[in-house]
Image (spheres, rainbow, N blue to C red):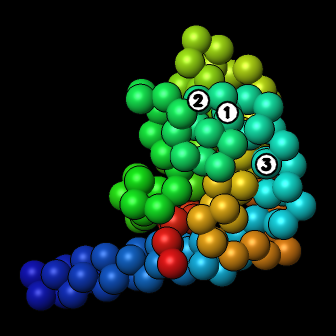
Amino acid sequence: MLTRAAISCLLLLCGTSLLFAQETKSTSTGVFAEEQAKKGEAAYQRVCASCHGADLHSTEPEAPDLTEGAFKFGWQGKTIADRFEIIRNTMPPGRRGAIDDQAYLDIVAYILRFNNIPAGNQTLQPNVDMLKQIVISVP
C-alpha cells in the first residue's frame, strides 16, 4: 500500500512537471511581432531614452544599459512577466504608470528585438499569467 502511494505521488509530480514544461516557452520562438517592437521603439524614444539613451546605452548613472552584458545579466532566464512588471511598476521614475500596460509591453518587445531576440507573428498582451510562461533566452 505504501509503495502504491509513493508511486502515485511520483507519477503526479512527473506529470505536473511535464505539464509545466509544455506551457513554458522561450523568446527564441518569436513571441512578439515586429510591428509591436516598432510601436515599442516609438514609446521608448518618447518615455525612456532621456535616461536609458536613444541607443539603449544609459545616459544616467542610475539607469542601467539595456544592451549587451547588462541585458544578458538582467534579462536571461527571467520571464517576460518579470521584466514587464518591474518596468511598469518603476518607470519612469516618479511617474510610474505614465503609459498604458500595452505600451509598456511594446517597449519590452523593442528591447528584446534590439538585443537580437527574433520577432514572430503574435503580439504580446498584458496578461501577466501568460507572460509568466515566456522565458527570456538571450542569443
Residue that lies at the very extreme toward the left in this rendered image: 2
Q: Are marks 2 and 1 in contact (CB under 8 Å)?
A: yes
Q: Is residue 5 above or below residue 71?
A: below
Q: Which mark is residue 51?
A: 2
Q: Residue at x 31, y 76 (%)?
A: 13
Residue nearest the observer in this picture, 129 or 77: 77
Residue that carries the numbered disc 1 in the rendered image: 48
Task: Name the amino acid, label 2.
Answer: Cys
Q: Earlier in the sequence, mark 3 or mark 2?
A: 3
- Quadrant of image for the N terminus: bottom left
Q: Residues within 10 Å of mark 1 (few under 14, many from 20)?
A: many
Q: Residue at x 69, y 76 (%)?
A: 118
Secondary structure category for the residue under label 1:
loop
Q: Is residue 45 above or below residue 3?
A: above
Q: Which mark is residue 41?
A: 3
Task: Name the amino acid, label 1.
Answer: Cys
Residue nearest the observer in this picture, 77 or 10: 77
Image coordinates for residue 11, horizontal then vertical, percent:
31, 85
Count every numbered label the image shows and give the total: 3
